[in-house]
Amino acid sequence: MDIRQLRYFIAIAEERKISAAAQRLHLSQPPLSQQLKAMEEELGTVLVERSGKLLELTESGKALYRYALQMTQLMEEAVSEVKEVGNGVKGCLNIGVNTLSSVELPGLLHQFKRLYPHVTYKIQQNESSRLCDLVKSRALELALIRLPLQLDDFSVFHLRNEPFYFITSLQAFSSRKEAALSELSGYPLILPSTEGLGVHYSILMAFSEQHMKPNIAAECSDIPMLLRLVSSGFGSALVPATVIAQLSDPTIRAVKITDPPLSAAAGLIWLKGHHLSAAAQHFIELLMNKSGDA
């Protein structure tokens, strides 16, 4: 059995119809059916069974499908790495960014593009926990996330902490530059994250350590929407400094939290024990060098 047959079997398993798999592979149906029969004869077991109009994997088929995915992925990684070594750094930088990622990212990408002009980019935005899942499934190579999170499966490069700000449209804060956390517990707050994620956890812990409970009016990880809600007077919010750089509405005031100082950590993650493309490796190096110069 060769890699070509494994790709055929993956298509059959995922499409569940010989006709659909053949169309996906740009083949006619008879040769694909013959390849399936040849694999079953070689392995001495039935791989698929018909269920109505669809094909269902047998237990043997499910086992082969799992290994086929792993083997084709390894083959693609091998081919990619060999090409990169032979031709210089090309390929694609496949990176995820959190909804509260650093405003420095565009500048980093501009710098990276100057160093590696042949690299293309796939940039996906999502919540930190979802980005971890995508890196773990290898749909992404790298992700910029907000901490803390459970990261046992990942290598992590910690980025600088950012201070938190209280943003509001309330006139009482029109001339304020700083505020204590104890002053804010009574105001309706919109959290820029959802339960179980890093920023959400950091905010709740900060209040808990001061023996206070925040008045949470809403959770909203869509930052443009959050800013519109704050501007309309729906509520105020606690946000990392990254969000302050996006403020363009003069009715929103930003007041730094200083008592106690509240900050948010971020990090770049990648999956432990797996090959990274040269583009991903060079991006990590760039980020580390930039952090060292700071």
Image (cartoon, rainbow, N blue to C red):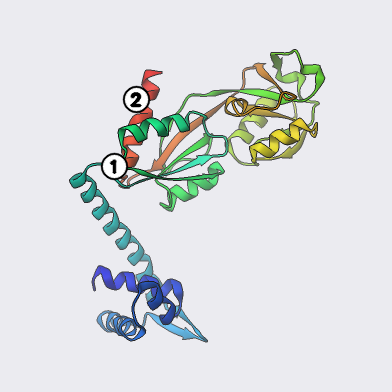
Q: Where is residue 187 in the image (x, y as percent from the top left)?
A: 80, 27
**In this picture, is 58 found above or below 147?**
below
Q: Can residue 59 be seen in this view?
A: no
85 vs 23, left or right, is left
293 vs 210, left or right, is left
Q: Which of 160 and 60 is in front in this view?
A: 160
Residue in the image at 74% along x and 39% along y: 218
- Label 2 secondary element: helix
Mark 1 or mark 2: name the one nearer the start of the chain: 1
Residue 287 falls in image quadrant:
top left
**In this picture, is 66 found above or below 252?**
below
* Circle 1 residue: 278
- Label 1 secondary element: helix
Q: Disc 1 marks which amino acid?
A: Ala
Give the class, few, some or many, for how many residues have Cα within 10 Å of label 2's Cα (few <14, many ≥20): few
Q: Where is residue 4 in the image (x, y as percent from the top left)?
A: 27, 70
Q: Disc 2 marks which amino acid?
A: Asn
122 vs 37, left or right, is right
Q: Which residue is at the far left? A: 86
Work out how far the residue at label 1 is from the one at label 2, CA to CA, in angstroms. 16 Å
Residue in the image at 69% along x and 36% along y: 226
Give the class, few, some or many, for how many residues have Cα within 10 Å of label 1's Cα (few <14, many ≥20): many
Q: Position of residue 173 (x, y in %)?
A: 77, 17
Residue 289's tag is 2
238 vs 146, left or right, is right
Residue 26 falls in image quadrant:
bottom left
Residue 158's tag is none
Q: Nearer the viewer, residue 130 or 44?
A: 130
Q: Can residue 222 be seen in this view?
A: yes
**In this picture, is 88 found above or below 63?**
above
Q: Quadrant of the N terminus?
A: bottom left
Q: Position of residue 206 (x, y in %)?
A: 65, 25
